[in-house]
Amino acid sequence: MNITSFEFALFFAAILPLNWLLRPHAGAYRLFLLLASYVFYASFNAKFLLILLVFSFLTWFFAVVFAETSDQRFRRFCLVLYVGFALGMLVFFKYYEMLYISADWLFRVLSVKSPVPLLDVIMPIGISFFTFQGMSYAIDVYRDPIKVERSLVEVFCFISFFPTILSGPILRAGNFLPQLKKERVGQPDFSRAFYLLIRGLIKKIIISSYLSEHIVRTTFGAPEGFSSAAVLVGILSYAAQIYCDFSGYSDLAQGVGLLMGFDIPDNFNAPYTSLSLRDFWRRWHITFSTWLRDYLYISLGGNRKGTVRKYANLVATMALGGLWHGAAYNFLVWGFIHGFGLVIAHFVGSLRPTRAAKPAAPAAGDANVPSGPGFFGGLWNAVCWVSTFAYVNVAWVFFGAEDAGKAVDILKRAVALDPDGAGFRPTCLVLVVLVLGVQLLNFTGRDVFRKSFDWMPFPLQGAALGVAAACILKLGPDGVLPFIYFAF
């Protein structure tokens, strides 16, 4: 039941009225929301529902143990047990085949028969997201027992909330549970919700799907058959594609959540306007980057144990963050590229102590702070933007290629300056420029949308949304691919 499918539209149309009818009835509403989330998740594969149930129960159980137990040694033991189970489950379902292939290669090098059996392990959809979501809650309770939620149903609702379970944004219990407990919720901002839904559909169905269909898959699959210019446009197109694909899903999740009375956090804030790699990770997949910071980087020691340890923690955090995305070594390489890039960014930043520090999490619509007034300040910003955007694009090649070897081939072809080979459709370059221009000019279209929709009564707004969605689906190619992050 893809969120862009007609089946999901019917599903949501059925549960939305019930959502508001049952909202004042706390017990019935929580059970309804949990059931709706489980029906949605089971629509992909009902067998995976058992894994979700077991993980949710253990998350609730260990959180209660953390809150009820004062013995620090026992609490630490339980934390290791819980994290070991959560990560072990993630490793088994997501990385078993990758680890088997690596172990089998090692045993063959050593001329030893591999004792590890090859199992046909199917990865449950969304496992990376609901695992991190549950872990954040349990670790928060371990750090501060007052944050415990004793209601089993509420914890289950938090972990399985259907708009976000497949591809985020990664929720925090401290933000979600208070909203779940509200029995009286004001009228949702329908205009903003419809705006997010239409924006998400345009990003995914029109832009992301077009770029994937007409240049990315072909240039990334066989770069030797294309001119260097076409491969370069393919690389730029992948950057636009993955942004529109992932931020498009986040927009849809936020829009669905708003219609149900939930405020889901932003996941993107014009990432391709970043003037540094540090700034990029404040703007790209925000809920994931803050998760890495709060639960991995800080747990490793953060910047509290000296400069060398800080840099090592940065590299380790980003490497593991890269591997989180998929069971392939090219994701690990992508993580290392960003890790070493962040080390360089921190080092350069330490050489310029007079520069004003940027906020940890820029608010929506915030622009980059110029490094200085006048021509030279603008020139410096331009150099910073170009270098950051180029670095991010090189890293994206390793993320989007089938393996690291293919990524190197793509990059070699792009810089070969060879005009021979197939070209590219100008429309692809136009879409790339459009995606970048919208971010650089800070144009959201929000005000235009409000003026077009706010005068309509709610039923008419809903009808207009349906017509707009039908037109967008018609404009998209046949057989729209699943969201990229469904694979993670």
Image: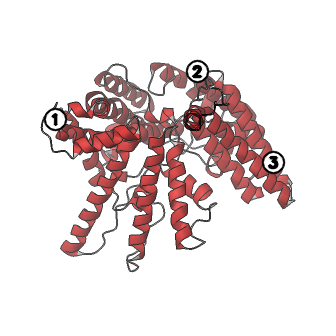
Q: Position of residue 37 (x, y in %)?
A: 62, 29
Residue at image coords 32%, 58%: 388
Kindly identify which residue carries mark 2: 43
Q: Position of residue 305 (x, y in %)?
A: 60, 72
Camera-nearest label, 1 or 3: 1
Q: Position of residue 79 (x, y in %)?
A: 76, 51
Depth order, front residue of 159/214? 214
**Is tag 2's residue or tag 3's residue first in the polypeptide sequence?**
2
Real-space Cα separation, disc 1 to disc 2, in angstroms = 39 Å
Real-space Cα separation, disc 1 to disc 3, in angstroms = 58 Å
Depth order, front residue of 81/99? 99
Q: Residue furthest bottom?
A: 354
Residue 446: which quarter of the image?
A: top left
Residue at image coords 62%, 32%: 93
> Is 104 on the left or on the right of 225, as rendered?
right
SS of the residue under disc 1: helix
Q: Position of residue 70 (x, y in %)?
A: 86, 59
Q: Residue furthest front?
A: 111
**What's the residue type where badge 1 is placed?**
Pro
Camera-nearest label, 1 or 2: 1
In the rendered structure, are the residues bearing label 2 and label 3 in contact, judged by CB atoms less than 8 Å apart?
A: no
**What's the residue type where badge 2 is placed?**
Ser
Kindly identify which residue carries mark 3: 64
Question: Is residue 434 depicted above or below 214 in this figure?
Answer: below
SS of the residue under disc 3: helix
Depth order, front residue of 130/321? 321
**Is tag 1's residue or tag 2's residue first in the polypeptide sequence?**
2
Depth order, front residue of 400/421? 421
Q: Which mark is residue 426?
A: 1
